[in-house]
Image (cartoon, coloured by chain):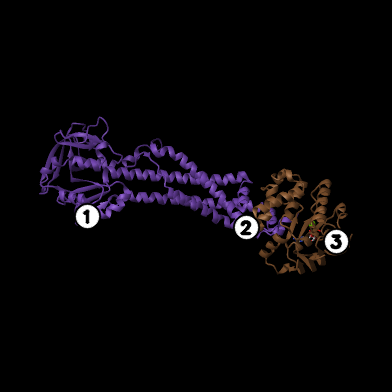
Amino acid sequence: MTTIIETKNLCKTFKDSAQEVHAVENVSLNIAEGEFTAIVGPSGSGKTTLLNLIGGLDNATSGKIVIDGQDISMLSEKQMTEFRLRNIGFIFQAYNLIPVLTAKENVSFVMDLQGRKKSETNARTRELLEAVGLSDRMDSRPAKLSGGQQQRVAVARALASKPKFILADEPNANLDSKSAQHLLEMMEKLNEQEKITFIFSTHDPRIMAKAKRIITLEDGKIVSDEYK
Amino acid sequence: MIINLAWKNIWRNKTRSFVIIGAIALGLFSGTYLSALMTGWVMDTVNADIKINLSHVQIHDSTFLQNSDIGAFFNKTAVEQQFASSNINGKMTCRLKLNGMLASANNAVGVTAKGIFKDTEMTVSDIATQIPDSFGVFLPDDARMPVVISEKTAEKLKVRLKSKIVFTFSDIHGNMQSLAFRVSGIFHTSNGLFDEANVFVRYNDIFPVTGLPDEAVHEAAVLLPDIETCALDFPKIKDLYPQLKVQDWKELNPMLSMSLQWTNLMSVIIISIFLFALTFGIINTMLMAVLERTRELGMLGAIGMSKRKIFSMIMLETVFLTFVGSIIGIILAVALLLPSLQNGLDLTPLIGNDFEDFGGFSSIVYPILNVEMILEIIGLVILAGILSAIYPARKALKLKALDAIRV
Ligand SMILES: Nc1ncnc2c1ncn2[C@@H]1O[C@H](COP(=O)(O)OP(=O)(O)O)[C@@H](O)[C@H]1O
Ligand SMILES: [Mg+2]
């Protein structure tokens, strides 16, 4: 399998007035295409910080991240935004859909940003919302959808741009267990059938159980990295 | 797509959007309404003064204007023929103008007697129509020595229709001449100063005692189709009479043309003050709109919306807000003005008739909508909107994508 994410001695230090927090410390890892990887660890262990670094939302203090052969620390902020648009899908804990747009429009939005053809965008939006089981709620705004449904729209949105991989920071944290289960099954299916690469963080043991690789962080350091 | 999103975003906080739209609408409404009213008022005054008093162009001997000297005359036929042989589309009438004393048994007032030719006078000035019913007629042909005076003069002299009054003036040789007239009509215009100063008699009644040579007149007045034509024809008329002093209505009544310019200036000042206040309102509103959306704007950046697009989105939201407000304000103003465009707006209950004594302001106003001005105002408002959006939009750019998503 080809490696799409490679980090080398990645460090992120937050400097508060008094203390320094080493949120991510010397993390070196490779993630290959098609992985279904969970990043786990107690609260404060650096999961979010690591995902933000990989997603190019934050700058590393030291170390290197290479995505698909591109050292992202070389990119300007503008280039990085464009890079995210083309290569990375995001799913957030709080769904973070655009509240004034319908499910359909939320999914199309990224493709519009990419400048895809209207016909292509419409077809793919329909397809994706069907795939996440929301073909009957395409014209609903987020406020009219349940948390589980919103998160499924978010998955469809993340997939819409045909990214190289999807980063999901605790995607289940705000969901009830049934919706969480459902969402995970959907992600699993997308991973198996469509070969979509998922990297998600969680501290829910039931969700960890589904992962094919579990990277455990503690105090910003990798303490274990297991494949199943 | 950004347009769609921006449009939807302005409706997410309806109250706030309506408040700012309402403020813009109200400002533009009052700006448009007031300026239409003021323009209408001034234009009414201008037109009334042109029709009754000034005409579009007046011609005098150049010394006449300095001292109204009876000897500063010119030859009527020569001037009329020159005008007729030019291709200018307009009407001309000639007048004698004699300063003197008008006396009744009770009182005496200083006036200018205009010795006019009724046929041509009525094609140039509306004075004959300013005599109300049952206040007589304008210098009837069969009357002996008729004079038309204003209601004000009649009151001062304590005279009425058919009363006998005497006009005394000095002729070309400096001898006092007195002529007895009988009041044939009493006029009333909206220009109190004009009313007090002028009386009308027939040229042929007063000419014989002036001692002036045949065909002598002091003034030729020209009425052109409208003010716009006047602007074009005035220089031509000027060229026609190099020896005489030719003036257009603006020169004849600088106050009048100035008040027209003042009106426009006032509108601009009012609108500018409003726009200045508006700017703060917009900055405040958009700043709130941006700050309360920190998380969302960060998310947009995270999923790959460029800063340029985010900036454009915020700018568009502002432009939409101001545009909607402007349109509503202007539609409101036009809707309220439409009925009064034809019939005029009677301001008597507000201002009374007092203004009439004061240089011809009528209490009934015919508002004038200046489309160019309206477009200019819309343009200015949108410009103010754009300028005041820059700060909030820049603020939006400073937000880091990251801060938005942290839970
Ligand atoms: N912006 C920040 N400023 C200062 N400290 C931070 C910031 N973000 C995270 N941290 C600290 O870094 C550590 C890791 O945090 P985080 O990555 O959010 O952990 P997790 O997602 O695993 O709960 C924590 O100690 C946290 O307090
Ligand atoms: Mg976290």
Question: Left or right: A91 with respect to B68?
Answer: right
Q: Colour of chain B?
A: purple
Residue B192 percent location from the top left of the image:
29, 41
Residue B100 percent location from the top left of the image:
17, 44
* Residue at 39% across, 49% down: B263
Q: Which residue has dot 2 on it? A: B309
Foreground residue among A225 and A61: A225
Point out the image quarter for the C terminus of chain A: bottom right
Q: Amino acid at mark 2?
A: Lys
- Residue B393 visible? The answer is yes
Point out the image quarter for the N terminus of chain A: bottom right
* Residue at 71% across, 51% down: A125
Query: Which numbered disc covers residue A215?
Result: 3
Q: In the picture, residue B176 is in which quadrant?
A: top left
In the rendered structure, the residue with mark 3 lies on which chain?
A
Q: Colour of chain A?
A: brown
Q: Which residue has dot 1 on it? A: B240
In the rendered structure, the residue with mark 2 lies on which chain?
B
Q: Quadrant of ligand 2?
A: bottom right
Q: Could you say whether the residue bearing mark 1 is in a helix, strand or loop?
A: helix
Residue A49 percent location from the top left of the image:
78, 61
In the rendered structure, the residue with mark 1 lies on which chain?
B
- Residue B344 visible? The answer is no
Q: In the picture, residue A32 is in which quadrant?
A: bottom right
Q: Amino acid at mark 3?
A: Ile
